[in-house]
Amino acid sequence: MVSPTLELQKQRALLVMERDAERNEFQRQTETIGIGRKVKRGDCWWPLKVGRSYYNSLNQLVVEVSRSEDTDIEHNFEYGRQVMFFRIDAGDNISYFKFAGTVSYAQEDRMVIVVPDGNAVAELQGHERVGVQLSFDEYTYQLMLRALDRVMKAKGNRLSELRDLFYNRSKTQKFSFAPIPFPWLNPTQEHAVNEVLLAKDVAIVHGPPGTGKTTTLVEAIYETLRRENQVLVCAQSNMAVDWISELLMDRGVEVLRVGNPTKVNDKMLSFTYERRFEAHPDYPQLWAIRKAIRELRSAKRRGSDSYHQKLDRLKSRETELELRINNDLFNSARVISCTLAGSASRVLQGMKFATLFIDEAAQALEAACWIAIAKANRVIFAGDHCQLPPTVKCLEAIKGGLARTLMERIVQSNPQVVTLLKVQYRMNDDIMRFSSDWFYHGELESAPEVKYRSVLDYDIPMTWIDTAALDIDCKEELVGETYGRINRAEAQLTIDTLRRYFERLGRQRVIDERLDVGIISPYRAQVQLLRRMLRKRAYFKPLKHLISVNTVDGFQGQERDIIVISLVRSNEAGQIGFLRDLRRMNVAITRARMKLFILGDSTTMTRHPFYHKLYSYIKDLEKS
């Protein structure tokens, strides 16, 4: 029998270790990495244009900022991220402002940032050479640590029951009713939805690549709402929350999105808490009262009795109106959606839900899941623990097991609650088969409509271009202040390979049929090198909108007609670094619908059994 308290204490210690390591690394980078490098990494905007300031619907003071250069660089700013501002003097010396900010809204080249007070706005607007960079996020760690403490202390309530159930092989409870047919779903999807509806405690929808996990989850949420008035839907990333929220809205479900979406358009914004709050008929009155409070506080006669009486009356009316608006918004919504950390928002304080759905559960730290679980009576996890794990940067924390998710823990302790989706609708069968055999015990099958899909007739769906067999020097090297790994010759070969394939297809056909391409490398430095090379090639300019270049993590949840992977690693010692994390390669190779190219040094890569098997599998395809 596992002691949940001891396991949670271990999780807490590992989380503190990760927090301290990330904080120390952030301080090191702040001191040693130049502004130009941070800009290229997407962690900094410089130079910055500081725009207007105003109070948002949450009564927070915000300032608009925009970047004027390098707008083609993808950035890492998103809702909820902590930021810090800096200025650079005439002698190019950097100094940081004493206040911090929080991203409220982020687009490609414009952000709205919450700042502490008017003095902060005045400081920013008073300097010309200003920039902003991502800061160490202490707040999210505080939320996770508090969540673990709450779970450990839980006694005699539903949270303590779920804790003990998740950590031990206790028998889970089910409702008893006949299965419901869903003829528009395949049998495993139908079974998964029924298992969700039957579960009293927990259910897991295990969705390998292309098996319609999100479709199944949306159906399960829709059916749950026939039995419950409201559910909470969470995910690790804002992007995943946006995606499932949009699909639910397309089904006619009233969604209230707490936190701002990453995809900024009218449809996405229309279901955010802030936009709905501002659209409420009582909001103009509330805004006027808040303005009156601010003006009263800035007045000179603050010590008089009349001042306090008037302020108390205004604040009482403000609270009354805010509660009324919130009640209207939350009572009309069937789904409340947010990130796991966002479930700690003050607007959700004190709320309880019969069911919590967690998408991307295999990418979320256990502590993050407990933030939301504290609000629920039962939990439905959806994800795939054979794809990308949570991001953990401290090697000691990884060795200690911090990257082991709550979903993985339940899969092992309560396998009876897991439903594996088995029919995939994305890939040519030859691409799918390797992943199925290695990661899913050969249980996956291809839907008939995709089984033989290809770009060219009689084309081999998978090709390994072995850089070790070519008469060029494709050795990896370390570059930059962060010692990122690149392979210049392999990058050149990657671009050439794509061009040759386009010439076989006919460039006009690629444009007419909108054949989309993903170029993937596990290494960020190689991604940046590939982007630069691609921009310089005139041949690809008419195709720019069809080609995206990113890391494996950047392609999670996406798919393309053609995928080209640059593995980078090429050395005599056979070192492959974090490419030993095979879940990353599972994601990379399963992004391709019809054609997959892998570029890599076989003498380096095939010393690992996975890559040896993959290389042999592809060579056998070429022979058949």
Image (spheres, grey):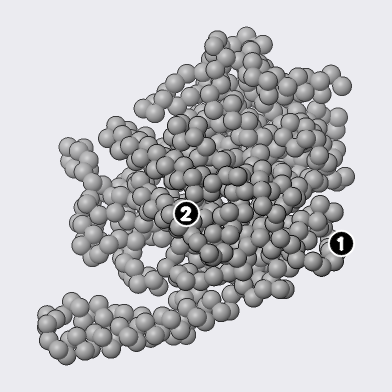
Is disc 1 in contact with disc 2, using a CB cutoff of under 8 Å?
no
Q: Amino acid at mark 2?
A: Met
- Residue 183: which disc? 1
**Residue 185 at x, y = what percent?**
82, 58
SS for dot 1: loop
- Is residue 42 among what the camera can see? no
What residue is shown at x 55% (from left), y 36% (from top)?
A: 551
Near-viewer residue (459 or 589): 589
Q: State the residue position of label 2.
A: 152
88 relative position to 49: left or right: left
- Residue placed most toward the observer, 375 or 461: 375
As drawn, 311 above or below 515: below
Q: Quadrant of residue 590?
A: top right
Residue 460: x and y in percent read: 80, 28
Determine the residue positioned at 60% across, 45% down.
1
Which residue shows up at 21% across the image and 37% down it?
92
Q: Residues within 10 Å of mark 2 (few under 14, many from 20)?
A: some
Amino acid carrying mark 1 in the image: Pro
x, y percentage for residue 130?
26, 49
- What x and y, as percent, mark residue 440? 75, 37
SS class of the residue under badge 2? helix
Q: Is residue 506 left or right of residue 61?
A: right
